[in-house]
Amino acid sequence: MLMVLLERESVLQDLAGHLQTATGGPGQMALVRGEAGIGKTTVVQHLIRVVPPHVRVLISACDPLVTPRPLGPLIDLAPELDTAVGTALSEALTGLGRPGEVFECLLADLSGQPSLLVIEDVHWADEATTDLLRYLARRLPDLPALIVATYRDDEIGPTHPLTGLLGTLAGYRWVSRHTLDPLSREAVAQLATGHTLDAEELYRVSAGNPFLVTEILCSPSENVPATVREAVAGRLVGLSDLERKVTDALAVMGHRASLPLVASVIPDIDSALEGVLACGILCTNGQTIEFRHELGRLAVLEAVPGYRRLLVHRQVLEAMRHGPVATDDLTLLADHAEAADDPAAVLEYAPRAAAHAAALGSYREAAAQYTRALRYADSLPLDKRAGLWEGHSLSCFLARQLDESIASRRTAVRMRHALGDGQREGEDLRWLSYMLWPAGKSVEAREAGLEAVRLLEKFGPSAELAAAYLNMSMFAAYDHEEAAVADCHARKAMAVGRRPGDAGAALQAQFHPAAARMLCEGSGWEECEQAVCSAMAQNLTLDAGFLALLMCWYTLIQHDDARASAAVQRSQTYCREHELLTYLHCTKAMDSWRLLNRGSWKQALDAAHEVLSHPLSPPIDQAIASTVLALVRARGGEPDAGAALEQAAHFVDRNCLIDLGIGWEGRVETAWLAGEDDRARTEARDGLAALAGRSHPWLSGALACWIRRTGGTPPPAPAAEPYALELAGDATSAAARWDELGCPYDAALARLSGDAPTLRRALTDFEALGARPAAARTRALMRIRGIRPVRSGPRAATRANPHGLTNREMDVFKLLGEGLSDADIAARLYITPKTAGHHVGAVLAKLGVHTRHEAARRLAS
């Protein structure tokens, strides 16, 4: 019987409106959220009642398993889909296809007819299911469908797997959110009408939770119970021994179970089924039987004695093993095997469940299954245990559990060494090397990579040796070694591991040497771009995503705003489209760096905070974000910049700070901004000493300029073009080059060594950016050089402006309100488009907004 709908009418009306819009196109997604028992399912059931006849309804749900079934909701939907699509989907789910084929099957089916797709309890979703929702959400505008997903928002914390999906969906305008609040006192009183229970006490005990209210009201002979456990117990009082046995077994088996499986555990279930369903906490669709609410199941489960739970798990395990084992049952088998205290069964099913989950892209679930197997692995031969640790390591890495990934790979290395299996040990060392760098351990990463090469060279040409050489080619670029070193490693890789169809390795062999030339010599950008584009064109998803991410970093090192903006945009778009969440998250740290360089400091600060607040951000990303945070604070004159900079140094080793460039230069600049010129020179000289034998012109040039700015004489050092111009005494040309690169703060710094007009321009630019300490140092320098007049701080008009805008910025602000482009603004104000762009960036930063439209709305308000 459908529950009474109270205080949910507006949500239902909104959902009905979404359905009408979606089934005519474009598609929509509605997220219905609230605590357990708040009425999400009831709202969905009422929505289904108003679905027009021509709209197909598909209902599925996620199960509360310890380790969720990969794509569990799709498994439930398969019988209801079009015959051809359902068959293809079933084949894909058995592991015969890739996860993308599963998604494409459902997408094709939804494209064919207006549909309402409901997926309930996505807080229990496996990683592949969240990837499916992300996949469908991006394509909804082209589908005649409404997707309704329900979840418990009180269980979603910052580390919950669903948080990442919700963050992605936040950017889609066709996704709506609907929160169900507890019932009011009046609504609870209305539900209590006709009952002998005191409505106020009922409201106090239930806190307005509809499920608790309903469960309590269904036990009229009881006093108002204090917990749902007692409410559910009241419903079970009238059951016979057999009916209670069935209910207990179902609670042990999980939220949902197939009737044939239940019958195999309890042969005479048919005679008890009617009474079990009549108690109201379970329901059936003829194929499965399930608890109406997970709280009800948990209440029953708590009362089941331990010996009885063990027996049921063993019975279920035996029943499921008796016939053919489907791949989508592996997760359930592993769950029951562990609960049945059957180590042999755990070791039989958990690794298979892990491999199946990984094949479907559910890496967190794969890691959990490997963890389960490893708890019972002591009896296995050493090589089998090593294989489990290797699987666990890779799954953790792809699930962004970096510490666990590294620890497991170290264990595998030790086991392979003990076995005398040098080739597998070398492969594990190569993986360990690859994983250590994002952990900020660049020195150890390189050592592990070299050891991998030494070991694998003993066994002759192989794909593993080729991968080890490519790893070292990549490190040569990271470390700013001579381009010839990266090229040598790449050539060796192609010589020992060339195989037909290994296009990804060939493209990486092209990319890394070109990247080394780009960073050290200023050439090679076109070859890098060609490799990225080729990887994307050939659908080499992992290679393309990785190389696109590296291009973000490399363009940022070169302070090229146009190229960096394009690289970040491309990387983010590609990673979203292909669900490469690990790489996608890394681009956020890169974006904070990009925004810092272009002078958009408020947005840079927001991006840095987002990275630092995410619990799965790797140390390398946290180091970048902490440095950005420190520099924004220092440039704005805030007192706590040093703490953020020390935190950045804590995340990664000294060599990694040098690799990144921004980390070491940040130490020098913050010292200068604090007026500590001696410390700034010392930090700069230490950095140049650390660069001995390496060609890092974008860092060594910066450090040499800082020595010069603080009154020292820099030693000869490779310097990128804008730094070389400044070191040669051509402040005007250096600043012009920085302006071309889109870096206004760097341009202002270069102008500090110029003549009086150039210094005045530097002061104006620093003030426009809100760089108070740099502006103060500029004024002091002007006084020392006798340049007058020197304004003390912002003009009176700027101080009077509520947003701190200069007169020129106010002119730009007003033109933004007219919707003008940079070129149009430049024409109106008789300035260059690049200068107009800088003014626009300064206006957005001071207003604390991200887009021109937001600025225009602020003007109109």
Image: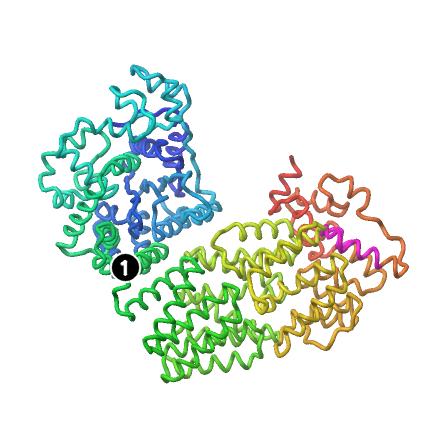
Residue 587 in view of the camera: yes
Q: Is residue 11 above or below residue 824?
A: above
Q: Is residue 179 above or below residue 385?
A: above
- Does the stretch in magenta take in 769? yes
Q: Is residue 319 above or below residue 373?
A: above
The magenta span reads: 764-781
- Does the stretch in magenta take in 140? no
Residue 101 in view of the camera: no
**Magenta region, mostly helix, strand or loop?**
helix
Quadrant location, the C terminus: top right
Residues 297 and 121: in front is: 297
Amino acid at dot 1: Tyr
Q: Position of residue 329 (x, y in %)?
A: 22, 53
Q: Secondary structure at mark 1?
A: loop
Residue at the image point whose x is 45% and y is 83% from the top:
492
Q: Position of residue 750 (x, y in %)?
A: 75, 64
Which residue is tagged 1? 376
Residue at the image point whose x is 15% and y is 46% from the top:
261
